[in-house]
């Protein structure tokens, strides 16, 4: 959450002291005491030179307060992080106004892939890529600027074996939260197969932009009653990418779910036999409806 500031207020940062004499084009990020672990996670990430020097990640400019406050349970207010100002997020703008803005797509994917490569080298998974965390400036110029923000849910990558041990039914919601947009736009079974790693992060970047362009094209939108959510999501992916060949299933249950998803995609609606049960089309056809496919 943002920190309430006023002209004339004095702040002590790790690098200098500040007196606010005018409005600042920075973002000062703080948190409630019970959520300061997320702010600390972000701070710890930016303490790595490879991350702090990455121009595709939103720049952290300073910290206001003592970093020891992250660990001090007696302090009611944790330190604040000062970030560069960006004009808007991808969530703030309408896709209808930017459907054919190829410069914007280039900026988003360049920033996204570069930042994920840096995080991947550091064995960190973003886990929370979504339109709100794709930050934009200079949208009216021929060269818009994009950066990736919010490393508060960043986690070290870990293996399938650890994931599989925690996939009790009661843990799925927690797992989906931890895996962020990559799981919301795909399915939990993907994480079972590949683990929380660089690979789902890259998928999540593409899925985030696609869902911004056409909400509901991936994920749980339109899911029918009494269907497993992951089955519905898997069938959507199969419909969007009919030529895609999955890696061999790592378990018999995943293999059976893939077969069931294929049958679901090919099924007729029992109440309206002239219609398919799922209204999913290949990605090129979906993009043509938006007017941006070649």
Image: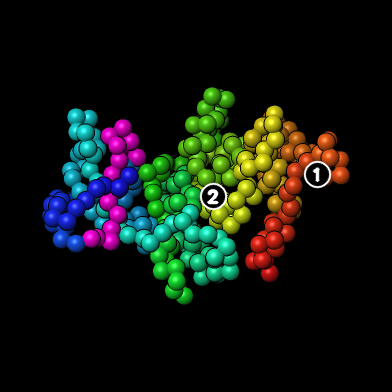
Percent from the top left, x then y, of residue 21?
A: 15, 61
- What label sits on residue 276 in the rendered view? 1
The answer to which image quadrant residue 276 occupies is top right
Seen as rendered, the residue at the extreme right is: 274
> Residue at (28%, 58%) from the top-left corner?
26
Q: Earlier in the sequence, mark 2 or mark 1?
A: 2
Name the side, left or right, on which 272 lies relative to 100: right
Q: Nearer the viewer, residue 62 or 225?
A: 225
Which region shows up in magenta?
23-38
Name the side, left or right, on which 187 lies relative to 82: right
- What label sits on residue 204 in the rendered view? 2
Q: Is residue 36 magenta?
A: yes
Question: For numbered disc 2, what is the local secondary structure?
Answer: helix
The answer to which image quadrant residue 189 occupies is top right
> Residue at (47%, 44%) from the top-left corner?
127
> Residue at (42%, 46%) from the top-left corner?
124
């Amino acid at each position: 959450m943002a920190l309430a500031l006023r002209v004339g207020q004095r702040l002590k940062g790790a690098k200098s002291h500040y007196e606010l004499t005018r409005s600042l084009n920075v973002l000062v990020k703080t948190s409630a005491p019970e959520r300061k672990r997320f702010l600390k996670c972000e701070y710890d990430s930016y303490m790595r030179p490879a991350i702090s020097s990455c121009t595709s990640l939103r720049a952290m400019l300073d910290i206001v307060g003592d970093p020891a406050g992250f660990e001090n349970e007696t302090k009611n207010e944790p330190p604040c992080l000062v970030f560069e100002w960006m004009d808007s997020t991808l969530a703030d703008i309408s896709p209808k106004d930017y459907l054919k803005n190829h410069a914007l797509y280039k900026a988003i994917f360049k920033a996204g892939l570069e930042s994920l490569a840096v995080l991947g080298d550091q064995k960190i998974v973003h886990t929370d890529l979504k339109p709100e965390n794709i930050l934009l400036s200079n949208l009216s110029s021929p060269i818009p600027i994009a950066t990736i923000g919010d490393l508060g849910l960043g986690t070290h990558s870990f293996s399938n074996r650890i994931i599989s041990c925690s996939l009790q039914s009661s843990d799925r919601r927690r797992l989906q939260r931890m895996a962020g947009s990559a799981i919301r736009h795909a399915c939990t079974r993907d994480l079972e197969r590949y683990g929380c790693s660089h690979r789902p992060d890259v998928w999540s970047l593409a899925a985030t932009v696609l869902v911004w362009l056409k909400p509901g094209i991936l994920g749980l939108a339109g899911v029918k009653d009494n269907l497993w959510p992951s089955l519905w999501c898997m069938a959507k992916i199969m419909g969007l990418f009919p030529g895609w060949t999955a890696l061999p299933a790592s378990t018999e249950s995943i293999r059976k779910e893939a077969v069931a998803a294929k049958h679901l995609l090919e099924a007729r609606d029992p109440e309206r036999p002239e219609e398919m049960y799922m209204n999913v089309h290949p990605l090129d056809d979906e993009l043509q409806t938006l007017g941006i496919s070649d």
